[in-house]
Image: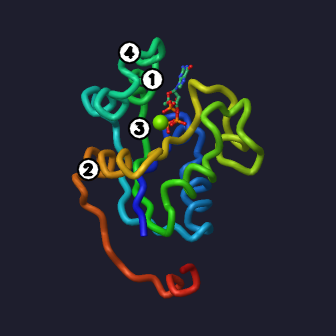
Amino acid sequence: VQKTFVMVKPDGVQRGLVGEIVSRFERKGLKLVAAQLMQVPQALAEEHYAEHKERPFFKDLVSFITSSPVFAFVLEGDNAISVARTLMGSTNPAESAPGTIRGDFGLTIGMNIIHGSDSPESAAREINLWFKNETVSYDKSVDVWLA
Ligand code: GTP
Ligand code: MG
């Protein structure tokens, strides 16, 4: 099984989409193993998006992510990283397929509602960065019907 880091961005929290989004992942069969609503410190935002430091939109991205609380969580399941990305849809909501989170709820790339780790390496880095690797391990009776 894999773990992935996911975050409902400030636009998703402000628009009341946290429950809808978490519900989609739960119904898919991914298991919540950590979660926190939090105001993101500047340093954490910069560290999280360090790979985009030289991009022209970096300042806007960091100020957006720190502008209002996010809902950060960790999901666990078979192929959790790519499955979560598939449910999220492509980066630009103007082009994301309907049925995906960005495709159903987003309009512009600057406010695309959700983040999800894009590889095993980034998932490991981000779960450590956001949750100090503190996730909960537990069994659910439906686990046997999912794998
Ligand atoms: P994340 O899950 O948020 O990392 O999105 P992603 O992996 O689908 O895209 P990527 O890592 O390439 O970009 C990170 C984030 O930067 C995106 O989710 C957008 O919020 C933002 N971003 C990317 N390109 C642009 C852009 O051209 N303009 C603006 N304003 N933001 C952008
Ligand atoms: Mg990314």
Mark 3 and mark 4: Cα distance apart in space:
25 Å
Q: Which of labels 1 and 4 is toward the front?
A: 4
Farthest top residue? Answer: 56
Q: Looking at the picture, does residue 20 appear above or below residue 59?
A: below
Numbered badge on residue 128: 2
Q: Quadrant of residue 49?
A: top left
Q: Amino acid at mark 3?
A: Pro
Report x, y in % for residue 15: 60, 39
Q: Which residue is mark 4?
A: 54
Under tag 1, what secondary structure? Answer: helix
Q: Which of labels 1 and 3 is toward the front?
A: 1
Q: Which residue is mark 1?
A: 61
Report x, y in % for residue 92: 64, 31
Mark nearer the N terminus (1 vs 2): 1
Q: Amino acid at mark 4?
A: Glu
- Asked whether the beta carbons under mark 4 and mark 2 sit within 8 Å of each other, the answer is no
Side (left or right) of 29 relative to 45: right
Mark nearer the N terminus (1 vs 4): 4
Question: What's the residue at 50%, 69% (across, down)?
Answer: 78
Q: Amino acid at mark 2?
A: Asn
Report x, y in % for residue 73: 41, 54
Mark 1 and mark 3: Cα distance apart in space:
14 Å
Under tag 2, what secondary structure? Answer: helix
The C terminus, quarter of image? bottom right
